[in-house]
Image: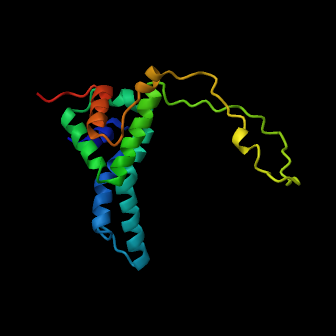
Amino acid sequence: MSFESKIIDTCVVMERNLLSPATIAYEKPDNGVTVHNKSAYFVIRDCAKITKDCLLIYLYGTLQNPIDQLRNKFTEKEIIDFVSRSNKDVQTKQLLNLIFVDIAKDQDVAHIKVPDNDRNVVTDFSEEKSDNIYGDYDYADIVEPDDEVTIDELNLMAVDITDNRAVIDKLISVFNAELEQ
């Protein structure tokens, strides 16, 4: 079983069964139907291609708490295969990136505080008669976050997404994957 099939099996939406029909429709858009309009043939084919390419991302997105729901479902081998394919396939890479966003949220390091600036302030942007209208640019107020983030907190998520081994190790740890003997 593949990494993606475990996601499909975890989902409860009816669209989880679309992958096989979409693959067939992409390869043979007139399968099971009579197409009288050339454009309809290409609409069917291209809709099937988009479904094939984006279905896993959609299904993953339907999970209420994907990290918890997928915990203990993967093997080390499935994770290694998934990460390897993410280097070659754009949709697999997108899914991997979404998973890492959820890992960060799950480990409570994904929140970023945005200062609550007063948006009703009116600023005069008319040019002044001055030699240097850019003079204050280097000295603009730099907004500091309310809470300092410590290095230890950042290390919870410190994974170089280009380092396959680090990504694999993180996924194995987060999902409590079954290790190969």
Q: In the drawing, does residue 98 fall left or right of residue 180? A: right
Query: Image quadrant of residue 103?
Result: top left
Q: Residue at x 42, y 73 (%)?
A: 40
Residue 27, percent across and down?
28, 66
Q: In the rendered image, which quarter contains the C terminus?
A: top left
Q: Nearer the viewer, residue 167 or 44?
A: 167
Residue 14 appearing in the image? no
Residue 77, percent across and down?
18, 37
Q: In the drawing, does residue 50 fall left or right of residue 73? A: right
Query: Image quadrant of residue 120?
Result: top right
Q: Nearer the viewer, residue 53 or 156?
A: 156
Residue 72 appearing in the image? yes
Query: Image quadrant of residue 4?
Result: top left
Residue 158, percent across and down?
40, 30
Q: Nearer the viewer, residue 109 or 51?
A: 109
Q: Nearer the viewer, residue 60 or 102?
A: 102
Q: Residue at x 40, y 42 (%)?
A: 97
